[in-house]
Amino acid sequence: MFNSKALLALAALLPLSFAQISDNFESGWDQTKWPIYAPDCNQGGKVSLDSTTAHSGKNSIRVDGAGGYCGHIFFGTTSVPSGDVYVRAYVKASKALNSNHVSFITMPDSSLGTNKHLRIGGQSNILMYNRESDDATLPDLSPQGIATSTALPTGAFECFEYHLGKDGTIQTWLNNDTITGLTVGPSISNPNAAQWERANYKPAISGVYFGWESYGGDVNTFWYDDVAISSSRIGC
């Protein structure tokens, strides 16, 4: 019979065990499993294994992002579900998101056209989504839309989760709290998603990549740990 400590240990492993792909990087950075991704150009960005900070254990993946589009660099995977996609990552940023447009997750998306991406990052000091094809943002970057998202705290690992549905649904959580401005879909009313909903958008991503991309001179360092991708919600 399991004792209570054994049951708690088993429960802690369940979210990663049932994920399609997951990693806590305690065995190092497997670059076959998590290759570098830097489309078009790669000038100055760096990805490395960091044993000085982590959400769990001792290791995380560190991304030093350089300024400008060609300073971008990511690591990630094409092992994503063919249907609904759920992603969970513990993320630590060294600098706060500011008024400029940046991305820290990018996903190639065939529904947007060749070599186009669905991006998650920041602008106007908040978390937001961006479609590369038409530059639409979620939420609208009006004062009302900005108020429905949130900043990404710095200096500590935060649990960031999102869901992309085949029907166009998007859901987003930060430390288990729903971000209402980053929620949209056929059965969801979001009055601050006018720009996003001008297209009948249904994500069709082929990969998930974590890192940094700026469209001006912004630089930042991000750390990622306990990353998991699944066809059902993983949780924090």
Image (cartoon, helix red, strand yellow):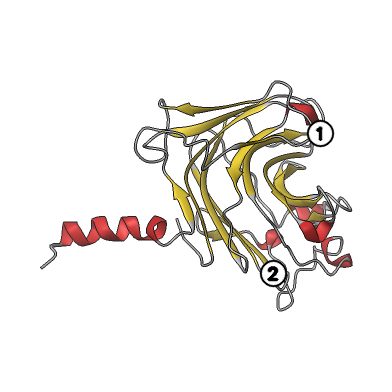
- Mark 1 closeness class: few <14, some 14–19, many ≥20 residues within 10 Å: some
Q: Name the residue under label 1.
A: 215
Please state which of residues 5 and 43 is positioned toward the viewer in this rendering.
43
Distance, label 1 to label 2, CA atoms, is 27 Å
Where does residue 4 sit, x and y in percent of width and height?
16, 62
Disc 1 is placed on an element classified as loop
Disc 2 is placed on an element classified as loop
The residue depicted at 78 percent of the width and 28 percent of the height is: 70
User: Which mark is on residue 165?
Assistant: none
Q: Can you tell which quarter of the image residue 36 is in?
A: top right
The residue depicted at 89 percent of the width and 66 percent of the height is: 198
The residue depicted at 85 percent of the width and 64 percent of the height is: 194
Where does residue 177 sit, x and y in percent of width and height?
54, 59
Q: What residue type is labelled 1?
A: Tyr
Where does residue 173 sit, x and y in percent of width and height?
57, 58
Q: What residue type is labelled 2?
A: Thr
The residue depicted at 81 percent of the width and 47 percent of the height is: 115
Where does residue 130 sit, x and y in percent of width and height?
78, 51
Q: Mark 2 points at which residue?
A: 169
